[in-house]
Image (cartoon, helix red, strand yellow):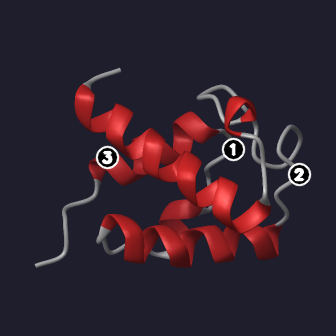
Amino acid sequence: MNAENENILAQVRDTLVDLFELEPAEIVPEARLYEDLDIDSIDAVDLLVDLKKTINVEISPSQFKQVRTIQDVVDVLAELPAKA
């Protein structure tokens, strides 16, 4: 994982800890959002909204629809251009 992805992972981890009171050690790239972290669809929308602000990217729900793991979230965010 490169430095940019590590930074995104750290931001995703911080967001999940803040929003859902998860343990940071649980938030690893292979963790599944729904099964392992108990994130439901409403929580996923909250996560999306918060990450848009935190990481300053433009992301649509359709781009976020296919994510299943923390690594998927990092990959989607890493591909997005920063907002101007």
**Measuring 25% from the left and 37% from the top, which residue is drawn there?**
4
Residue under label 1, please give it. Answer: 68
User: The C terminus lies in which quarter of the figure?
Assistant: bottom left
Q: CA distance from mark 3 to mark 2?
A: 24 Å
Residue under label 3, please give it. Answer: 78
Indicate the quadrant where residue 5 lies: top left
Q: CA distance from mark 3 to mark 1?
A: 16 Å
Amino acid type, callout 3: Ala
Horizontal arrangement in the rendering, residue 30 relative to residue 75 (left or right): right
How crowded pointer 1 is (Cα within 10 Å; few <14, some 14-19, many 20+) is rated as some
Camera-side mark, 3 or 2: 2
Q: Are marks 3 and 1 in contact (CB under 8 Å)?
A: no
**Measuring 34% from the left and 40% from the top, which residue is drawn there?**
7
Q: Are marks 3 and 2 in contact (CB under 8 Å)?
A: no
Looking at the image, is 71 positioned above or below residue 11? above
Res. 61 visible in picture: no
Q: Position of residue 79 (x, y in %)?
A: 29, 49
How crowded pointer 3 is (Cα within 10 Å; few <14, some 14-19, many 20+) is rated as some
Q: Position of residue 30 (x, y in %)?
A: 66, 25
User: The N terminus lies in which quarter of the figure?
Assistant: top left
